[in-house]
Amino acid sequence: MTTRPTRNSVAYVRDIKGDRPNRIRAWPQKGREPPEGPFMGQAPELSALFVLDVAQVSIPVGGTTKTFSNPRTDPDGRVWWYVRAYDRDTKTVKDGWVAENEGGQVLLESLPSHDGCTALMHTQRPSHLWDGMQACVVPAIGLIIRSDPLNTASVVGGLPVGSVVTVTGEAHCDTDGLVWWRIPKDWICENEPIQGPPDEDGVAWYLLPMRSQP
């Protein structure tokens, strides 16, 4: 069963007909008015995307600023999401719009999380990574590398945004609910819980899987 994306989640480009990438555009439109959003890159089939947790996005379009809802349905019935993606050609992280559907086909699907933490906490924390997977650093400020899977552990380095790493072993959850992975001997944080309205707590994601599966 296809599961639709939601804001502040990880989604992936479905493999519909072999090598069919999903184009990333500067704004959510293809044909009609406003003019077609400029092509910014492409997300290959089975690649993962981070659906950004913003309800509206303001973008310069043709000399003026337009505000689009996230998600947005265009006049042709396509549903667009504002995402953060890793561009393999330029090896950079880009924010742009991708279509969930096209011509009756579903192109974008949510990537289910799994209980990835080993037990220091009774509450399990979600993860989208597995041993041996590659992931991209998405926060603009990068990620701190620590000697142990604790926020108070010694800092041994850092990774700038766009860095690609391979995680190893099993995810580790510390007492603050942070999810940690080895890379390969030191540790970086995949995500952490964020507080929201009652019963609507979410997760801030720091590592984006390069593919939808190991």
Image: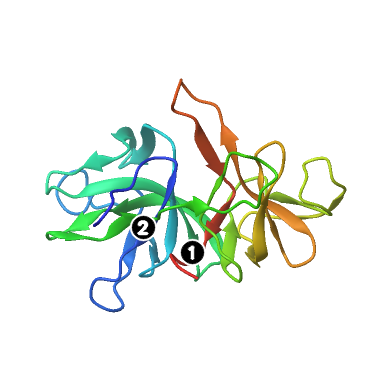
Horizontal side, residue 144 vs residue 128: left or right: right
Horizontal side, residue 63 vs residue 86: left or right: left
Q: Residue at x 58, y 62 (%)?
A: 135
Residue found farthest to the top: 198
Q: Residue at x 42, y 34 (%)?
A: 54
The N terminus: image quadrant: bottom left
Circle 2 residue: 24
Q: Quadrant of residue 52?
A: top left
Where does residue 125 sit, x and y in percent of width and height?
56, 44
Say whether disc 2 or disc 1 marks the residue closer to the N-terminus. Answer: 2
Task: Give the crowd class for mark 2: few <14, some 14-19, many >=20 residues within 10 Å.
Answer: many
Residue 14 visible in the snapshot: yes
Q: Quadrant of residue 30?
A: bottom left
Where does residue 116 sit, x and y in percent of width and height?
57, 54
Q: Residue at x 79, y 65 (%)?
A: 185
Circle 1 residue: 87
Check the image and report above or below for 72 versus 42: above
Check the image and report above or below for 158 versus 15: above
Where does residue 196 sit, x and y in percent of width and height?
49, 25
Q: Amino acid at mark 2?
A: Ile
Display colour scheme: rainbow
Q: Amino acid at mark 1?
A: Asp
Horizontal side, residue 106 vs residue 175: left or right: left
Count the labels in the image. 2
SS under mark 2:
strand
SS under mark 1:
strand
The reply to whether dot 2 and dot 1 touch (C-beta < 8 Å) is: yes
